[in-house]
Amino acid sequence: MKQAGFFDVEERLARLSGLGDQLEAFSRTVDFEVFRPDLEKVLAYSDGSKGGRPPFDPVLMFKILVIQTLNNLSDERTEYLINDRLSFMRFLGLGLSDRVPDAKTVWLFRERLTQAGAIDGLFNRFDATLRNAGYLPMSGQILDATLVAAPKQRNTNAEKADLREGRIPEDWQDKPSKLSHKDRHARWTLKFTKAKLQDDGTMPSSDLAIPFFGYKSHVSIDRKYRFIRKWKTTHAAASDGARLREGLLDKTNTASSVWADTAYRSKANEDFMEKQGFVSKVHRKKPHLKPMPRHIQKSNAGKSVIRSRVEHVFADQKSQTGLFVRTVGISRATMRIGLANIVYNMRRFLFLQRISTTA
C-alpha cells in the first residue's frame, strides 16, 4: 500500500466537494468569525505569559460543537470522527499532522460556555447576521413547543416528590457522585398521540397517552423565512401557553399576527397580546360538551395551514440532527437546545441562499 501524498488528499477532498459536502457549504456561507468576540469575552483566555500549552482557537472549538449538533455525536465519537474524516478536518481547518482536541477538551469548552450562559448571545449574534443578510422577521410569527427526550431517571416516589418541591432528596446529599448523575430538572409528562383506526374498523374512544421524560423546547419562528427568532427551554411538564408571556414574542417582526395552537388560548394570553400590540390568530378551543361551531372550525382550519409550518422546524431538528439531551440539568439542556436552534437557522440560511442563487 503506497504512502498517501498531498495530491492524493487534495483529490479526495475534491471528490467530497463533488458529492456535496454540507460542511463545505457551511464554510462558504456562514462567517464563523462573527462568533469570535462573544466566545473570547466569555472564555477570557490568558495571554500565555504564564506559559503552558496554548488553548485551541475558540472559533475552531465552536465549529466542533456545530459538527456535534449536526450529527448528534457524543464527545468521544466527535474526537474519533475528527481524526477519521477529511471533511471534518477541512471544515475545522486542520491538517493531518495538526493536534486535534480530545473529548475532555470538547466537554470543558462546552461546559464553560454553559456555565457562562453564553448560548443566548451566540444565538443573537447569528440572528443579527441573518438580519444583515436581509432576512428580517416578517409576515407575523408562529409559536409552538416540542418535547426533547433525556436519559430516564430511576427515582423512588419520595425522591420524585422532593424534586417536584425543589428539594434535594436526603439520601443524595451526602453522595456527591450520585447527585452529579441525577437530573433534578427534567420531568415526566404525558405525550398524547392521535388514536388510530383499529383492525376491526372502529376508532378508540380516546387518544393514546405515552409517558415521556425530558425537556421542552419552545420556539417562535417568523412566517416569511421560518427562522427561529425566539426560544426557551423548560422541563417537559411545563405549560406551553404560559411561555407566550415569557419573552417568546418577537416585537421586531414587521407584522403583528401571532399563530399558535389551542394550548396558547387563554384570557391572560389574549389580554397580553392585545396590550403588546399583537393580533391573535391562536386556535379557538372546542366548547365543552358542544359541537364546534362551523365558522370556528373553518377559521381553525385556515390557521392550521399557516401554523403547521413550525412543525417542519421540529421535524428537521429531530430527523436531520437527532435532537436529544444526553446531559444532566437544565443549564446543559438549554445549551444543547440552543445549539440545535443555531444549527437549524444555519441550515435554513444555506437553503435560502442556495435557492436565491439559482432563481
Image (tube, grey):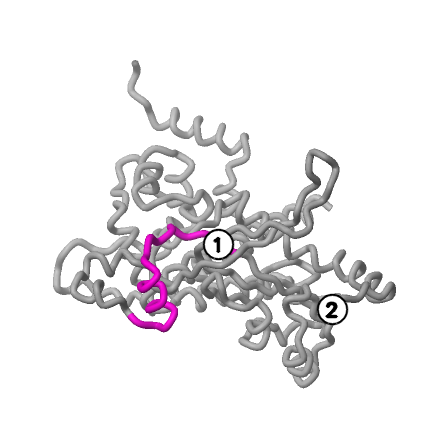
Single out the residue that lies furthest toward the bottom: 275
Closer to the camera, 10 or 132?
Answer: 132
Q: Position of residue 321 (x, y in %)?
A: 49, 45
Q: Is residue 249 magenta?
A: no
Left or right: residue 127 compared with residue 135: left
| Disc on the earlier residue, 2 or 1 | 1
- Tally the numbered discs: 2
Amino acid type assigned to the residue bearing label 1 in the image: Val
Residue shown at 50%/60% (left/top)? 216
Measured along the vertical axis of the image, is residue 78 above or below residue 112?
above
Left or right: residue 4 compared with residue 322: left
Single out the residue that lies furthest toward the right: 294
Instruction: Compute the Cα span from label 2 to label 1.
Output: 31 Å
Measured along the vertical axis of the image, is residue 80 above or below residue 136?
above
Residue shown at 12%/64% (left/top)? 50
Q: Name the residue carrying label 1.
A: 148
Using the image, tell me which numbered label, if any, was put on residue 288.
Answer: 2
Left or right: residue 300 compared with residue 312: right
Closer to the camera, 248 or 290?
Answer: 290
Q: Secondary structure at mark 2?
A: loop
Range drawn in magenta: 147-167
Left or right: residue 37 compared with residue 284: left
